[in-house]
């Protein structure tokens, strides 16, 4: 095929398996620990929170996990997603680089999150669970889970970080349209939330607090389970449909990636895009540079430490070995709500320690500048989270312009920004602040590691 703009695959090309990278790694990641005994957690510890099938996937040693037919049938609503050559962006930069983006914003809720929300709702429904609880930052995960629960007849209850609840009222409405119940977090309906409200009635909330609330309710009701939108192995594995399709699409375009860039909050879209390419890299077939991009206001890879920490603020979750800023860290209210998480996926943290990819941090002004350029050249308005990946993609393409290198750059455009226009408005009117994080705030939060 000569110089395509958009590479689309037929419905029959949706992958039949998710790819579990763990058996291909030189060493397995350290296990989650029970906070009381400090022993690795077993299935019984997790059973109050997750259905057995997802617990099995979480610790699976199988390379390929088959995608159930009922899940494939829902995936067919928007998969395979297109791989698009960013020719307008390339032209505007005057770069010899060839830039491709895998666009996940065409899913019903507008991001990559339904790739895991759908199987999670499916396995819970199969096990007879009646209700799922969860947290959401910017609202993308909550709306993805609300959509997925509606597909399989489950109730859905969402704790939305208060800062986002105010900033993104239409994301809240979207969840309600899908039939979910939404609380601003911290909320008075849980003891974890009430405790924080008692200390700080104006708390803007955080993902860590919202997780505590959702876990508390799931853990105390027999018919209720909890769903997590990122961080855990099974979530990252579900997202690998992104990278599997991208491999086939780049091959159809006759291209081999030199640089792969993705944004990281808990790590799921980055893992979804990169794991299949890292498999090929470990097998010696390709050798791309792989780079994660995180916000300067919440820099877990680049300024956090690699240690066992809680996944939530109240300390209800198992201890996870990960890059963390400390479970009590309260990130500034940047607009990329999906990147405001104190920790990072343990699997990605382990792989970062193994040197399998790099990480950089960016301020939000540079990212929104990149988002505007992207919208004006490619037409799609990116969500604030993937503007981080786009900013780094642009930086790489500018380096190519200076060196004359014709690199192939691949990135994930993991969601659209139609619900984030107030953030763009703030940027365009010059009201957006960059929060440079003082070292004392990191030191203070890290002083409370378990
Ligand atoms: C949730 C979300 C993120 C951050 O989560 P990851 O697990 O790191 O992908 C990034 N972008 C979008 C569009 C999201 O919805």
Image: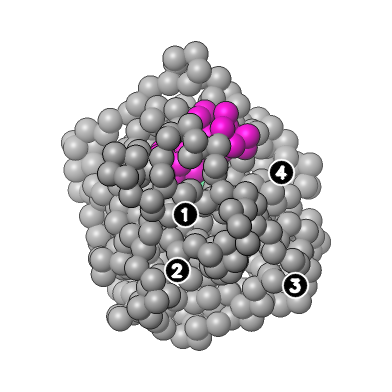
Dots 2 and 1: beta carbons under 8 Å? Answer: yes
Q: Which label sits on residue 175?
A: 4
**Going by the image, does 290 lie left or right of 256?**
left
Q: Quadrant of the N terminus?
A: bottom right
**Going by the image, does 284 lie left or right of 123?**
left
Q: CA distance from mark 1 to mark 3?
A: 24 Å
Q: CA distance from mark 4 to mark 2?
A: 33 Å
Q: CA distance from mark 1 to mark 4?
A: 31 Å
Residue pointed to by mark 1: 410
Dots 3 and 2: beta carbons under 8 Å? Answer: no
Instruction: Kindly state the secondary structure of the residue where label 2 is placed.
Output: helix
Instruction: Kindly state the secondary structure of the residue where label 4 is placed.
Output: helix
Q: Position of residue 378 (x, y in %)?
A: 59, 37
Dots 1 and 3: beta carbons under 8 Å? Answer: no
Residue pointed to by mark 3: 12
Q: Nearer the viewer, residue 174 or 253?
A: 253
- Residue located 24% across and 47% down the image: 303
């Amino acid at each position: 095929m000569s110089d395509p703009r958009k590479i689309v695959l037929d419905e029959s090309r949706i992958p039949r398996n998710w790819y579990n990278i763990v058996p291909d790694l030189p060493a397995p990641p350290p296990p989650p620990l029970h906070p009381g005994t400090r022993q690795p957690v077993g299935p019984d510890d997790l059973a109050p929170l997750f259905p057995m099938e997802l617990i099995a996937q979480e610790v699976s040693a199988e390379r390929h996990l088959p995608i159930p037919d009922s899940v494939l049938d829902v995936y067919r609503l928007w998969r395979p997603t297109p791989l698009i050559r960013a020719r307008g962006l390339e032209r505007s930069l005057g770069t010899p680089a060839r830039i491709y983006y895998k666009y996940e914003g065409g899913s019903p809720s507008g991001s990559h999150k339904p790739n895991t929300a759908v199987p999670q709702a499916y396995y819970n429904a199969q096990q007879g669970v009646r209700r799922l609880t969860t947290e959401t930052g910017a609202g993308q995960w909550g709306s993805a889970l609300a959509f997925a629960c509606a597909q399989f007849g489950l109730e859905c209850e969402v704790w939305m970080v208060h800062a986002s609840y105010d900033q993104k009222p239409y994301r809240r409405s979207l969840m309600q349209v899908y039939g979910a119940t939404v609380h601003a977090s911290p909320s008075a309906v849980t003891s974890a939330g009430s405790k924080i409200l008692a200390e700080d009635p104006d708390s803007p909330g955080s993902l860590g607090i919202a997780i505590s609330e959702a876990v508390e309710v799931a853990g105390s009701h027999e018919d209720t389970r909890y769903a997590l939108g990122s961080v855990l192995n099974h979530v990252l594995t579900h997202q690998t449909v992104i990278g599997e399709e991208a491999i086939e699409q780049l091959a159809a375009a006759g291209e081999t990636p030199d640089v792969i860039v993705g944004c990281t909050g808990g790590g799921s879209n980055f893992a979804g895009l990169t794991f299949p390419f890292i498999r090929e890299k470990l097998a010696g077939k390709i050798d791309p540079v792989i780079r994660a991009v995180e916000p300067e206001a919440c820099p877990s890879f680049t300024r956090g430490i690699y240690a066992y920490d809680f996944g939530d603020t109240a300390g209800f979750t198992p201890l996870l070995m990960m890059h963390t800023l400390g479970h009590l860290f309260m990130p500034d209210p940047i607009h990329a709500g999906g990147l405001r998480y104190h920790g990072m996926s343990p699997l990605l943290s382990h792989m970062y320690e193994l040197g399998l990819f790099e990480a950089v941090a960016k301020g939000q002004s540079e990212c929104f500048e990149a988002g505007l350029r992207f919208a004006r050249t490619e037409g799609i308005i990116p969500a604030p989270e993937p503007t981080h990946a786009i900013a780094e993609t642009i930086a790489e393409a500018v380096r190519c312009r200076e060196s004359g290198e014709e690199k192939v750059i691949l990135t994930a455009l993991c969601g659209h920004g139609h619900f984030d226009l107030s953030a763009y408005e703030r940027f365009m009117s010059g009201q957006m602040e960059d929060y440079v994080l003082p070292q004392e705030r990191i030191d203070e939060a890290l002083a409370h590691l378990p």
